[in-house]
Amino acid sequence: MNVFRFMWHNHGQVMDLTLEHLRLVGFSTLFAMIIGIPLGIVIAHRPRFNKPVLASANIIQTIPSLALFGFLLPVPWLGERSDRLAILALTLYALLPIIRNSFTGIRGVDAAVVEAGRGMGLTESQLLFQVELPLAASVILSGVRVAVVISVGLATIAAAIGAGGLGEFIYSGLAMVDNTVILAGAIPAALLALVADFGVGWLERRLAPR
Amino acid sequence: MQPAATPVIEFRDVSYRVAGTQVLSGFNLLVEGGETVVLLGRSGSGKTTSLKLVNRLVTPTSGEVLVKGVPNGDGDLIRLRRSIGYVIQDVGLFPHFTVERNIGLVPKIEGWSEERIRARTQELLHMVGLDPEIASRYPNQLSGGQRQRVGVARALAADPEILLMDEPFGALDPLTRDELQREFLLLQQRLHKTVVFVTHDLREALRLGGRIALMEAGRLVTVLSPGEFLQSTDPLASAYVRAFGEGLESAANRGTS
């Protein structure tokens, strides 16, 4: 129970690092959604592009995270601030599940429903916003949920390049060979992942089509 | 009807080819205002494609389709589609909308007032024989027959002159189908829409059609009235009559009983 005593004594720092962590995950997920959802929709409508886009996102996913942080360090503007860099790297990792689920979600909408809508005279944007997106929403959100959970874990590695977050405790703990400090970073990170998983999962069920 | 009236729908030498397959070749057909023309044929005969040519879900490779005398590729596509009611076999009701929103969708995007939409929805539910109480339900809470009725109500919502129906009763059990066919006839007696109805069921064609357009392998074989169809010496028509067996005359007598 040393861990909790440690966390209590350093509660200010725990809070700060947790907020930093949330910031990294929040921004990267947001950016990944802004890029990934439209991209997923486009490739669902233009099957020609789906292979190259999904393959690229897949390749990004296979780059070891520590290496990706390292690769991005020399990039101007980005390298100046390690949190920018961390957010970019996390965004890249979050893309695959979001693109893939947006693609699958839109593709999964009953063709008869879309055809009926088109035949009734809905414009393409009315079809997208009133029919396809609402029906695909829960599938898209489950991609977001996977992305968030991955990001919460990955963001701990961002501390290696000085981007802050709960990884700071983990790295200091590793350096000091002190499990208490490692756990002070790992436990809140795990809790964050659980809360995010539950929260987005709840939203996903709310938006599930009947 | 004046003999000189423009046909509501006219197929002019329409062909449609996709991915190397000739789906429709040299298709010519006139549909007059207020009549029900049934496109009868087996799967792959091109009947559904013909229907989709009317609201331009399909664009002809050659030839043209005229709606109220105007080639349907000329004007605003969205306007064209909103002026044509469309009912398909899988109904295609929006699963995330209530019955009321499904029916009121086109009126809503056309900018009708909430009040007017509500009144229209109630009127339509009544017209297709549904309890107005189901307005707040979702499609998955309805039976197949109820869903199909909602589909018809939705197609009628903005009071289109033309109704396209693609095997609307195909997936229903025989009793419900019979009920809906009967109601369709009663409805049509009141509304006099111009209807193009696709089916592969000869009995349904005889019962509902003013004229039957028999199709095979992307070609129009012949156009006959139900009475003529039964007497026809056309090999395909008589093959149909034989395949469906006894009791067709009563269907052709348009029994609403």
Image (cartoon, grey):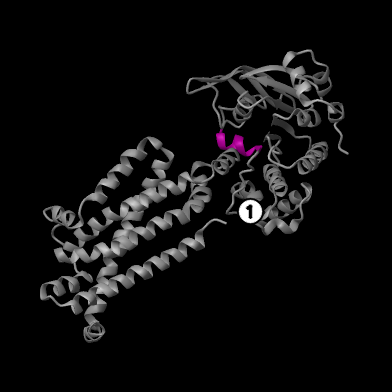
Name the residue nearer the viewer: B139 or B52: B139
Q: Is residue B154 left or right of residue A125?
A: right
Q: Which residues are magenta?
A: B76-87
Whether residue B6 is visible here, answered yes or no, is: no
Question: x, y (%) of residue B144?
Answer: 69, 47
User: Of helix, strand and loop, which one carries label 1?
Assistant: helix
Question: x, y (%) of residue A54?
Answer: 33, 44
Residue drawn at (28%, 44%) of the image = A56
Task: Please identify the quadrant where the C terminus of chain A is shown.
Answer: bottom right
**Figure quadrant of residue B212:** top right
Name the residue nearer the viewer: B246 or B134: B246
Question: x, y (%) of residue B213?
Answer: 72, 22
Q: Is residue A162 above or below residue B97?
A: below
Q: Is residue B149 above or below residue A176?
A: above
**Figure quadrant of residue B35:** top right
Question: Is A81 part of what is drawn in magenta?
Answer: no
Question: Is B86 part of what is drawn in magenta?
Answer: yes
**Figure quadrant of residue B68:** top right
Residue drawn at (42%, 68%) of the image = A199
User: What amino acid does circle 1 point to?
Assistant: Asn
Residue drawn at (29%, 68%) of the image = A22
Q: Which residue is mark 1?
A: B140
Name the residue nearer the viewer: B237 or A115: B237
Query: Tag 1: Cα neighbours inside 10 Å, few (<14), some, or many (≥20)?
Result: some
Task: Please identify the quadrant where the N terminus of chain A is shown.
Answer: bottom left
Dot 1: chain letter: B
Whether residue B246 is visible here, answered yes or no, is: yes
How many discs mark residues in the rendered view? 1
Q: Is residue B56 left or right of residue B160?
A: left
Question: x, y (%) of residue B222?
Answer: 72, 16
